[in-house]
């Protein structure tokens, strides 16, 4: 007698069910839907126009159906007729389906049993959805197999990343779009946008940044826009991004009230991917800006009782702001997109900020092709995410060192680092520039009184001034917006109207 008490649990299950037949589940499929679709196409070739936007031969479960669809679509796109007679030539030597049915006869049967083409799209969606479910099963099987038999150099984190990448790729394939949009519909949307801006009173069609001159130049942050915010180190890219984030997250949304006067006023939801700094460091910078306490004093604990009160008040005000921070470093564009979708689904999302592009990575395939191809995938993915979520995305970017070699160190589009795709995919390119940073480093010998006096005058002229250079804007002017900058609080703000440089444009 076998001592089952010492057998593993899974062995016990096998022993208990040894006499039961093993049940095998066939992958999801619908042969009848495939037949109805192919029959409709063979009867009326115009039916294929309704499905070619998303359906491919690989989506058919039956290999013969995939071959028939591919052959028929090739003929139709070549301007020829696809009927059982014209397709017969391509299947005369095909292996019979059974002893009594050849493939040419099967084509005649498909056409004779065809239903109306009205349901063609529904049949095609059924075939497509079932193919997607089969792909999901394969992804799941790959996950299980890699978890069971993973090599030593393939850690769980890498397995998760591969699975996420596979799911993201599958999700992207499902976006076959809505096709052509009637121009009258597009016109209505454009008029509604203009009317909303007029009704709001601030004349902005997008999300206000809180920086008046910048908003006047851009009309606010426009939905579906990819905005590149670039600059050399220490220019204040992250400072400007956090300023905009807190301004957006703490100001009341009025646009929703124009659509529904009874709707509650809600703050805009901001997602911030901080790939370089931790959430704690980012929060400390924002606190410094809002409480107007130097960040180095906060870090060192060198604050008095009055400053501590301001810090607590600022913290309480910010704690209710819908600002979400993801501090994960080195994530892929696929992971970023998945997390952004989740945030939008669970909390809503009005603005996404990524700090910064060069710290993102692409898929393993693109990474092996070089950094230029990888950055291209990243910027293309960010632009696609803008359109999918219908939100503006501000993505920070480093600039190449060639800026430092020029006498005029104001950046330009050619300075964007690593890939021309950044300039190409961006709807808006903003450069942050502070002349004060460079002048401070040119201090002459104090003994040279004349030179030192001129240096002091030059420094005083640009003291506390930051420039945002709009190098590209698809739907607006380019030029320069000047802002005030307080370095000890890492804070950009509107420039005083009485300042000699206020309101100036290049």
Image: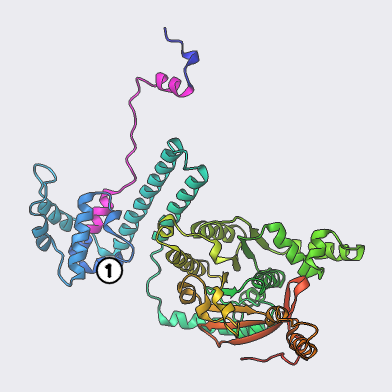
As for residue 14 lying within the magenta part, the answer is yes
Q: Which residues are magenta?
A: 9-38
| Residue closer to the observer: 21 or 5 | 5
Residue at the (40%, 43%) spot, across then down: 142
Residue at the (11%, 46%) spot, across then down: 96
Relative to 450, does residue 67 appear above or below in the rendering?
Answer: above
> Residue 47: horizontal and vertical position, in percent?
25, 66
Residue at the (43%, 40%) spot, across then down: 146
Residue at the (73%, 88%) spot, across then down: 458
> Residue 484: horizontal and vertical position, in percent?
73, 81
Residue 174 can be seen, yes or no:
no
- Tell me the quarter of the image containing the N terminus: top left
Q: Which quadrant of the figure has residue 322?
A: bottom right
- Tell me the quarter of the image containing the C terminus: bottom right
Read off the residue under disc 1.
Answer: 49
Relative side of 433 to 45, left or right: right
Relative side of 145 to 287, left or right: left
| Secondary structure under the numbered disc 1 in the rendered image | helix
Relative side of 66 to 451, left or right: left
């Amino acid at each position: 007698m076998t001592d089952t008490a010492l057998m593993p649990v899974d062995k016990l299950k096998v022993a208990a069910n040894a006499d039961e037949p093993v049940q095998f589940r066939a992958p999801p499929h619908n042969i009848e839907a495939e037949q109805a679709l192919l029959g409709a196409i063979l009867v009326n070739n115009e039916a294929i126009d309704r499905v070619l936007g998303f359906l491919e031969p690989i989506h058919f479960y039956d290999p013969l159906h995939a071959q028939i669809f591919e052959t028929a679509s090739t003929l139709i796109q070549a301007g020829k007729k696809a009927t059982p007679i014209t397709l017969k030539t391509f299947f005369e030597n095909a292996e019979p389906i059974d002893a009594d049915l050849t493939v040419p006869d099967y084509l005649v049967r498909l056409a004779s049993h065809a239903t109306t083409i009205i349901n063609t799209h529904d049949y095609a969606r059924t075939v497509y959805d079932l193919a997607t479910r089969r792909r999901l099963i394969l992804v799941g099987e790959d996950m299980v197999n890699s978890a069971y038999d993973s090599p030593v150099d393939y850690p769980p984190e890498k397995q998760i990343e591969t699975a996420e990448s596979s799911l993201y790729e599958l999700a992207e394939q499902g976006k076959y779009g809505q096709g052509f949009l009637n121009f009258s519909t597009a016109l209505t949307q454009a008029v509604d946008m203009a009317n909303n801006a007029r009704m709001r009173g601030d004349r902005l069609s997008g999300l206000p940044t809180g920086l008046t001159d910048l908003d006047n130049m851009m009309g606010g942050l426009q939905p579906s826009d990819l905005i590149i915010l670039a600059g050399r180190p220490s220019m204040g890219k992250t400072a400007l991004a956090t300023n905009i984030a807190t301004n957006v997250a703490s100001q009341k949304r009025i646009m929703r009230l124009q659509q529904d006067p009874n709707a509650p006023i809600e703050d805009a939801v901001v997602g911030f991917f901080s790939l370089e700094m931790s959430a704690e460091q980012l929060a400390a910078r924002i606190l410094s800006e809002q409480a107007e306490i130097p960040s180095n004093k906060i870090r060192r604990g060198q604050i008095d009782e009055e400053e501590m009160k301001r810090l607590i008040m600022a913290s309480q005000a910010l704690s209710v702001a819908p600002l979400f921070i993801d501090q994960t470093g080195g994530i892929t564009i696929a992971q970023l997109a998945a997390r952004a979708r989740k945030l939008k689904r669970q909390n809503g999302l009005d603005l996404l900020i990524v700090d910064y592009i060069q710290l993102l990575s692409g898929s393993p395939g693109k990474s092996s092709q070089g950094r230029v191809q990888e950055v291209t995938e990243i910027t293309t993915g960010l632009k696609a995410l803008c359109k999918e979520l219908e939100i503006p995305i501000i993505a920070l970017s480093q600039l190449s060192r060639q800026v430092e070699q020029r006498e005029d160190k104001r950046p330009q589009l050619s300075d964007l680092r690593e890939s021309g795709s950044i300039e190409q995919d961006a709807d808006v390119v903003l450069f942050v520039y502070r002349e004060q940073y460079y002048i401070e480093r040119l201090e002459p010998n104090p003994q040279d009184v004349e030179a030192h006096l001129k240096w002091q005058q030059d420094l005083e002229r640009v003291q506390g001034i930051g420039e945002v250079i709009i190098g590209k804007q698809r739907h607006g002017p380019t030029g320069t917006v000047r802002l005030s900058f307080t370095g000890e609080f890492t804070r950009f703000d509107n420039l005083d109207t009485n300042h000699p440089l206020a309101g100036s444009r290049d």
